[in-house]
Amino acid sequence: MEKKKGQTVFEFILAAIVLFSIIIYTLTFVGGEVSLFSDNFDSDRMESKIIQVSESIINPHSKYSIVYEWPVFDRNKMIIFNNNCNGDYVSLLNGLGLYKTDPLGGQHNIHLMVRADVLTQPITTVIECGRRPDDLVERPRVFEIKRIGIDSQTGYPVELKIWLW
């Protein structure tokens, strides 16, 4: 009976290398896919959140409504919304449900900016609430929605823009 120690060790090493290569490839592939699906989920969640916020602002029966009756934007309600937003921004965010809950239970606010312009010459800004991201290079993805209505005071079109990030 011959002893084949060297050949057996070589086959074992080759099989171990192939096994570990497959495991590393699989983990890398799954990690990339999980990241992709997680990013898609976050984008979908933010898109639905911005639609929810815009609907609550243009719903006549909402607490934060700026319309008298769709599509007529009430000038007085817009001014009140602007004053309340600039006065107590955090309460507005919490009232609209704009916060994320991390896995440990902490809450972090989602940032909001609302701007309503009456499209006359010159353009009149009625609502300017919140702020845009400061860092243009490493800023998070910003989601935007536009709504067009009519100003109750002048009859001119009003462009309502909402940004979330």
Image (cartoon, rainbow, N blue to C red):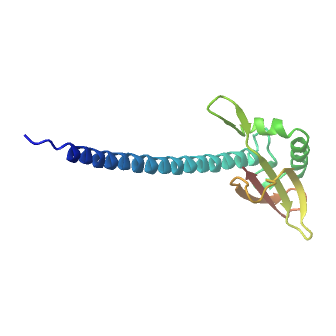
Horizontal side of residue 44 vs 137, given as left or right: left
Residue 146 percent coordinates (x, y): 73, 58
Q: Residue at x 57, y 49 (%)?
A: 39
Q: Residue furthest left?
A: 1
In the depicted structure, whether residue 137 falls above or below residue 80: below
Q: Nearer the viewer, residue 50 or 32?
A: 32
Number of labelled discs? 0
In the depicted structure, whether residue 51 falls above or below residue 102: below
Residue 114 percent coordinates (x, y): 81, 52
Q: Nearer the viewer, residue 21 or 85?
A: 21
Q: Residue at x 91, y 44 (%)?
A: 83
Q: Residue at x 73, y 45 (%)?
A: 59
Residue 80 percent coordinates (x, y): 90, 44
Residue 94 percent coordinates (x, y): 76, 35
Q: Nearer the viewer, residue 97 or 68?
A: 97
Q: Residue furthest front?
A: 2
Quarter of the image with the N terminus in it: top left
Horizontal side of residue 146 vs 8, given as left or right: right
Horizontal side of residue 124 vs 145, given as left or right: right
Q: Nearer the viewer, residue 87 or 134?
A: 134
Q: Residue furthest bottom?
A: 121
